[in-house]
Image (cartoon, helix red, strand yellow):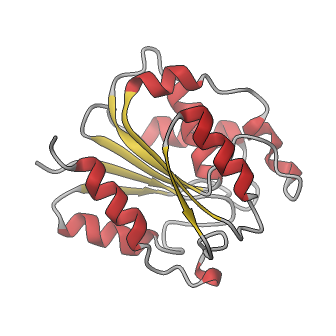
Amino acid sequence: MGKQVYIIHGYGASPTNHWFPWLKEKLVADDHQVSVLHMPNSSDPKKEEWLKTLANNIKNVDNNTYFVTHSLGSITLLNYLEQLDPLPSFGGFILVSGFSESLSSLPSLNPFTAEKVDYKKIISATHSRAIIAAKNDSIVPFQLSQSLSKQLNTSFYPVKKGGHFLEDDGFFTFPLVHEVLNNMMKPV
């Protein structure tokens, strides 16, 4: 039984960047439905536009729904899930280089982190949660991903050298994400 996976890119990216096409191809080969969402104006993102894009593209959220997000896509997803009322129980998510606090290097993204997320609401609705972060990430400090992992009570996968997991960091494929997601989606 295939799952529905939504891949949500981050700041300055598009669905064709980094490891997103590779991951989509791998998942489609395993009979999953995959949508790599195209987030609007990614070099000048607006929180309301990004939330609207999720609302318009995510068809239904249930036990077969999984999310893989990168960087700014992570806090956007958390904000979106929190707004759902009620928030249905769903499969899970992997936040890559996720953060929920403002980034001193990118103050223009502060609106995304201005309001605190209701982590308990999200934890109670999810079966599986994971965060992957690199110790040498120069864009999202490792500590921020670590702190988000604690707040969301996720599995945490520290990577020694991954940078921000961009093409520039050599990430055209990302086997760790695929492996963690596969484990999440396995029937219990």
Please give the name of the residue rendered at 52% of the width and 35% of the height, measured from the top-left corner.
153
Is the residue 106 above or below the residue 121 in the image? Answer: below
**Direction from residue 33 to residue 84 in the image, left or right:** right
Quarter of the image with the C terminus is: top left
Q: Position of residue 165 (x, y in %)?
A: 59, 71
x%, y% of residue 65? 31, 40
- Numbered label tally: 0
Q: Where on the picture, by quarter, is residue 30?
A: bottom left
Name of the residue lying farthest toward the left:
1
| Of 123 and 57, the residue lying toward us | 123
Is 163 above or below relative to 47?
A: below
In the figure, is residue 164 to the left or right of 88?
A: right
Residue 27 percent coordinates (x, y): 26, 64
Q: Position of residue 18 (x, y in %)?
A: 53, 75
Q: Residue at x 64, y 41 (%)?
A: 148
Between residues 154 and 14, which one lies in front from this camera angle?
Answer: 154
Q: Is residue 122 left or right of residue 35?
A: right
Q: Nearer the viewer, residue 173 or 60?
A: 173
Image quadrant assignment for residue 49: top right
Q: Is residue 175 visible?
A: yes
| Residue 45 shows in this picture | no
Residue lying furthest top: 86
Q: Name the residue rendered at 41%, 68% in the picture.
A: 176
Q: Residue at x 48, y 35 (%)?
A: 55
